[in-house]
Image (cartoon, rainbow, N blue to C red):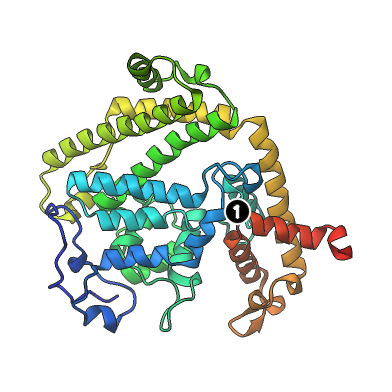
Amino acid sequence: MTRNSAISLAEDRSLASYACHGPDTRGRQFDEDDETNSIGSRTAFQRDRDRVLHSGAFRRLKHKTQVFVYHEGDYFRTRLTHSIEVAQIARSMARALKLNDDLAEAVALAHDLGHTPFGHAGEEALALCMADFGGFEHNEQTIRILTLLEHRYANFDGLNLSWETLEGVVKHNGPIADHVKPRPAIIQLDAELNLELSNYSSGEAQLANLADDIAYLSHDFDDALRAGLFDISDISHLPQVKQVLDRIGRKYGKIQRERLIHELVRRLISVFVEDLLRQSASNLRALDAAHPDEIRSAEKPVISFSARMAADLETLRDFLFTNMWRHFKVNRMTSKAKRVVTELFNLFMSESNTLPDEWQVYENQSLSTLPDEVKARIVADYIASMTDRYASLEYERLFNLRSILR
């Protein structure tokens, strides 16, 4: 691991002492002369953000869905729009708390890169296929993309991101407890960089994690209402929703349904953000941290919702689980998606010569000659990289007899 020596490069706004400062990064896996010898205008975290934005994996998020698969319609959110929304919320909150908005944005943009096609259905299917070959988990896949699978730079694989950004992605859901065995890619990265897995992540990464919750809960209500999975009357009793609807009604009276949905969603986001900022600011004052490592070593997360808001969010999450994520229309699409992923995996494992040429060779060896566990990981990498559209087209080409006759 190398440490950035461009310490004269100043941040372009005022940051708190407990924020991560780009010029003080703990470094990258591989030295880059153009960075360490440069007095350019970008800090390490700005470079990280830009590398994620320009990666192939990030572009493919455009056609990877959250809950609905691509064919349910172009309006609904994809992993790309979700990642952008998370980054916007995280960046705004970081500014308010005088945390490093560049780092918060980099973590937010990177956090979903490892997701499969077809949302959670695709991951469930691929995890089941990989059960005998080391398993599959999207957070580990994100790390594989960031450190191994992106082949863009001349002198290293992956994106060679900073320690702080990688730490934030690895600990996206919090510390990795001593009794939990990390996934292999994370074990390997920790051995190289010492990510301090049992500690919390930086304040910026904690913020990106909760911005993810805010974005997907709010926008899942938006998508589900517009899809007709439930109506506004079905959610008017829910905590926070009721108060927001009451305020809209008092201010505007009866308004068009589309406008009402938009007002509801944007005001819910504001309610969640304001609560998180109030509680986190109080936590930061109580901690009185003078360095970002004091946030990492705290006994509990420093960036958090109030206890009441956290409970309300759980109630909203439970409602969505029952009425959206397990709705029969979603279940039908989920069933189709799982079959596509499973049958593609089985075919590629038994007939690796049906893979594209560039995926049939690994370290100068034919895939057909490799142990099953190695072959399965490469097949999983290929399937996980697919968009919803591409996976559907591959399935059509490989399993639909009519495609032969065209």
Picture residue at 10% right of the left edge, 52% below the top: 290
* Towards the viewer: 343 or 181: 343
Residue 17's place in the image compared with 166, above or below, is above
Picture residue at 70% right of the left edge, 79% below the top: 369
* Towards the viewer: 90 or 189: 90
Residue 26's place in the image compared with 64, above or below, is below
Q: Is residue 43 left or right of residue 141?
A: left
Residue 67's place in the image compared with 389, above or below, is above
Q: Position of residue 40 (x, y in %)?
A: 21, 75
Residue 76's place in the image compared with 250, above or below, is below
Q: Position of residue 73 (x, y in %)?
A: 62, 43
Q: Secondary structure at mark 1?
A: loop
Tally of numbered discs: 1
Q: Position of residue 210 (x, y in %)?
A: 34, 42
Q: Is residue 142 left or right of residue 39?
A: right
Q: Is residue 206 visible?
A: no
* Towards the viewer: 65 or 174: 65
* Towards the viewer: 393 or 99: 393
Q: Is residue 33 visible?
A: yes
Picture residue at 57% right of the left edge, 24% below the top: 230
**Residue type (three-letter) at the residue carrying disc 1:** Pro
Q: Is residue 71 left or right of residue 105?
A: right
Q: Residues within 10 Å of mark 1 (few under 14, many from 20)?
A: many
Q: Which corner quadrant holds the C terminus?
A: bottom right
Picture residue at 21% right of the left edge, 64% below the top: 22
Q: Which residue is mark 1?
A: 117
Q: Position of residue 62 (x, y in %)?
A: 53, 55
